[in-house]
Amino acid sequence: MVKNILGTTGTRILNAFVNLIILISLTRELGSEGFGVIMLVLLAITIIQLFIDLIAGSSLIYFTPRTSVLKLLLPSYLWIAIIISLSYFLLGILSLHFQGLYSIIIPDGYEMDIIVLASLNALMLTNYNILLGSKRIGIYNIIFTIQVLALLLVLTGKLFYLNEVSVDSWVTAVYYSYMLGYLLSLIAVLYKIRSFDLSGGIRLIVDVFKYGFTTQVANMLHMGNKRISLYFLNIFTGINAVGIYGAGTQLTEGLRLIGQSISLVQFSEISNSNSKEFAKIVTIKLMKFSVILTICALLILVIIPTSIYEYVFTSEFENLKIIIVALSPGVIALSINTIFSHYFSGLGRPIVSLWANAVGMIVTVVLAIVLIPKIGYVGAAITASFSYISTVIYQYRIFSKETNTTFQSWVPNGNDIKDLKNILQNFKRRS
C-alpha cells in the first residue's frame, strides 16, 4: 500500500507541477478573460461527466474486483454515448430557447469542443477507473503522467513556438492529451481481459447504477459546492472575475493532490477488503498524513508575498493571495473530505457523502447569494471554505459515531510521525 501511495503521490506531484506551468502560461498569455473562458469550458465538461459517472464513474473501482471487466466496459461505453447525445440535444434546446442561460454557462463558439472533449474525457476516465479497480495503480500512474505531459508539450508549443496565443491553443492541447490518455488506457484494459462471458450483465449494471446513483448525486452536490460560484461570478461581476477566481482555485486545489493520491490507494484497498476495522484503521492513519502534508504545502502558498504573485501571473491577478488565504480553511477541509468520502464509498455507503454534500450545498447557495454580489471573488472563496467545513463536520460526526472513534484518535502520535518520516524517506530515495 505504501508503495502505491508513493507512486501515486509522485505522479500527482508531477501533475501539479505541470498544471502550475500551464496555469502561469495561460494567465500570462491569455489574461483573466481568456482563463475565465477556459474555466467555463472545463466546468461544462465536468457537469457532463457527472451524469456519465452514474454508471461509468468511481463505482467501477468498487465493482471491478468483483466481476468481469468486459461486463463493465461495454455498458459504460454505451452509457457514455447516451449521455453525450442527450447533452448535445439539451445544448441545442438551450441555445434556441434559453439564450440568456446558455450564454452564462457555455462560452461562445465552444459548444462542439465541449461535446467532443467530454466524450474523450469520459472514455479515458472509464478506463482509468477500471485500472484502479484492478489495483493496476502503477500502469495508471504511467499513463496519467504521459497524458499530462502531452498537454504541456502541445500547449507550450502552440503558445510559444507557433505563437498561436488563443484559447483555441489550449483546446487543441486538451484534444491531444485526452486522446492519448484514452488510447493508452484502452490498450492497458484490453490487454488484461481474460473472460468474455457477459451473462448477468444486465443485473450487474442495475447494481452499478444503484451504487453509482448515490455516489454521483453526492459528487454533483460536491461539484456544485466547488464550482457554482463561477456562474454567480459570471452573472454579477463578469468573465474576468471568473478567470481570477479560477486561477486562485487552481493554485489551492493543486494541493488536493496529497489527499487525492492517498485516497485513491485507500479506496482501492478498502474496496478489496471486507474488514470494517481495517477500513477504519487505514482511514485514520491516512487522514493524519493527508492533513499534515496539506497544511505544510498550504503554508508555502500563504507566506509567498503578494508581489511575487503579481510578478508571476501579471498585475491582473494581484489579488490572488487574498483568494488563497480565504480558501485555506476550505483546502484543509477538502483534504479531510476526500479521505472520508472514499472511506464511505469503499464500504459501499456513499449515501453518507451525499447528505454531507447536501449540507454543503445549502451553505454554498445561501452564502454565494449574499457575499458574491458584495465582495466578488473574495466572497466566492469564503463561501467555498464554509461549505467544505460544513461537509466535513457532518462526515466526522457519522464516522465517529459508527466506529466509536474518539477525538484523541485523530491526534498524531509518535508512531504516526515515525511512519510519515519513513514514507517521506522512501519517497526521497525513489525520486
Image: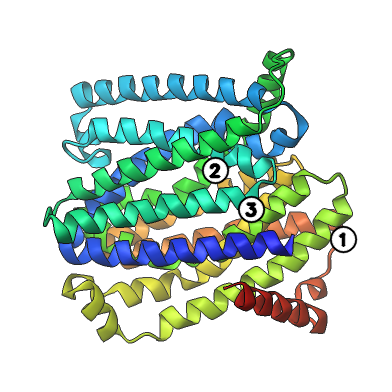
What amino acid is found at the position of numbered circle 1 in the picture? Asn
Q: In terms of image quadrants, where is residue 381?
A: bottom left
Q: Is mark 1 on a helix, strand or loop?
A: loop
Q: How far apart are marks 3 and 1 (CA)?
A: 25 Å
The mark found on residue 219 in the picture is 2
**Residue 184 visible at all:** yes
| Upstream in sequence: badge 3 or badge 1 | 3
Q: What element carries label 3?
A: helix
Name the residue located 70 percent from the left edge and 34 percent from the top edge. Answer: 64
Q: How far apart are marks 1 and 2 (CA)?
A: 27 Å
Q: Nearer the viewer, mark 1 or mark 2?
A: 2
* Residue beneath disc 3: 264
* Residue beneath disc 1: 404
What amino acid is found at the position of numbered circle 2 in the picture? Asn
Q: Is residue 320 left or right of residue 303?
A: left
Up-down relation of residue 321 to residue 224 (above or below): below
What amino acid is found at the position of numbered circle 3 in the picture? Leu
